[in-house]
Image (tube, rainbow, N blue to C red):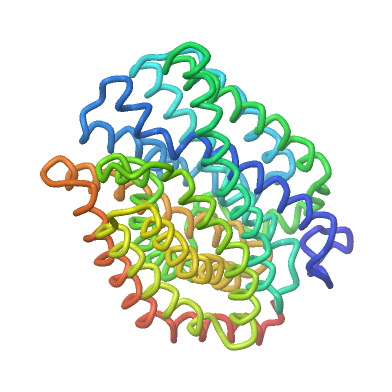
Amino acid sequence: MNPESTLQAPTTVWNRNFIATVLANLMLVMAHFSVNTLVATYAEHLGATPVFMGLLTGMFFFVALAMRPVSGPMITKIDKRKLLIIVFMLGCVINIGYAFFNSIPFFIAFRVLNGIQYSFMGSLVMTLAGDSLPKAKMASGMGIYGIGQAIGMAIGPAVGYEVFQWGTRVKNTDTGFTFLFLFAALIFALALIPSFVIKPDRKTKEEIASTGAWYKNILSKHAAPMAIVMFFVMIGYSILNSYIFNLGSEKNIANVNLFYTFMAGMLLLSRPIAGWLADKYGGATIIIPGLVIFSAAFLVLGFATSLPLILLGAVIAALGVGGAQPTIQAMSLQSESPLKRSVASNTLFIGMDMGLFMGPLIGGKVVDISSFATTFKLVPIPILIGLVCFIIILPIQKRRVAQLDALGE
């Protein structure tokens, strides 16, 4: 391997690239959650029906999925730093478009562009984080990486909601949404700062050629099992993020925006601890109980009748998914060699995109014939299916990691 390659294994978690990646991810998540938690509300404001609202909410995940055959190979072949700068600049443009074109046709157009951007964002930042971590501390590092996501989840929805309310008080609801989207555009602009700090890739032509043709960098058969698990987890996660405000409104519970603050607070604790435990005792010790706990949170939320129960559901959900999600991410990255980590990441995000698209769509149909509370009560079904899948594929994952260890990769 080229001695100047940025793919050489780091010796410590706390290095320049990892710190900059965590900061960039924090801003990415902050901008994403400030907008996406109100997308269903915005679609409803524009006059969308419940089913169409679910379709609009999940649309960009479908577009992102359709773009994976393009974005995955590009992340493998092209300098990841340059790509990160481009996608953050695109985020600015998209949210400015949301702010000034207030109609369903324009919303759909910018939502499609948002999906194209999203097809790069998650897997790109996750790959940058994985490339910046020692293999033996991958789960610990991904847990720390998830802290940025937890902080973004706490600040994004809460501040985004306040910005929306501020704009509404200034003039009307349209102004509230305009302020919200401009706020997200500003955060994407600020995210360019840590993006420029990240060192550029220095892969040699030989290293790039060794990854094979573009179509060989779309899917990883070794990461596919974990992507299946993530698919079922994300069905529940997407319903949680898309409909938690609607659930509060249906039950006449005020201050539901505090849900994300409490959830993020628990994520700050659960993610790094879970990562350390996963490195020490194995991923199964975290993922199995994590998914059971995550499914239980939806029952608490579905039956909740007051804000304290909603906040209890937030803490339980964070405890479950806060351990399971970064561990699944780490196990996915560990299933491929360093040069092909972006392929593993892309594969995992294909599973995530499918779950994030299907969740609101299924949820919208359930809401149309029943209620948001019923939707939450049914969510444990897909999560527990994901748990069964993980138990089945765990021996396959262990054999693959042992194979890479034997090859010294």
At which x and y percent is residue 275?
Answer: 62, 74
The residue depicted at 49 percent of the width and 32 percent of the height is 114
Q: Residue furthest left?
A: 369
Q: Quadrant of residue 6?
A: bottom right
Q: Is residue 351 left or right of residue 401?
A: left
Left or right: residue 159 compared with residue 258: right
Instruction: Work out whether residue 118 or residue 397 is closer to the camera in this orientation and state it.
Output: 118
Q: Is residue 160 or residue 122 the one in the foreground?
A: 160
Q: Nearer the viewer, residue 13 or 311?
A: 311
Q: Taking 328 as reference, is 194 above or below it?
A: above
Quadrant of the snapshot with the N terminus: bottom right
Residue at position x 33%, y 75% in the image: 389
- Residues 311 and 395: in front is 311
Residue 146 figure quarter: bottom right
User: In x, y percent, where is residue 159?
Assistant: 58, 36
Total labels: the figure holds 0
Q: Give the residue drawn at x 46%, y 76%.
A: 287
Whether 263 is drawn above or below 269: the answer is above
Question: Is residue 73 at least partly visible in the picture?
Answer: no
**In this picture, residue 225 sits left or right of residue 100:** left
Asked if 278 appears above or below 131 in the picture, the reply is below
Query: Where's the C terminus, which quadrant?
Result: bottom right
The image shows residue 341, relative to residue 67, as above or below, that is below
The spot of residue 106 in percent (x, y) is 40, 17
Q: Position of residue 194 (x, y in %)?
A: 78, 42
Q: Please tell me in which quadrant of the rendered image residue 313 appears.
A: bottom left
Residue 186 in view:
yes
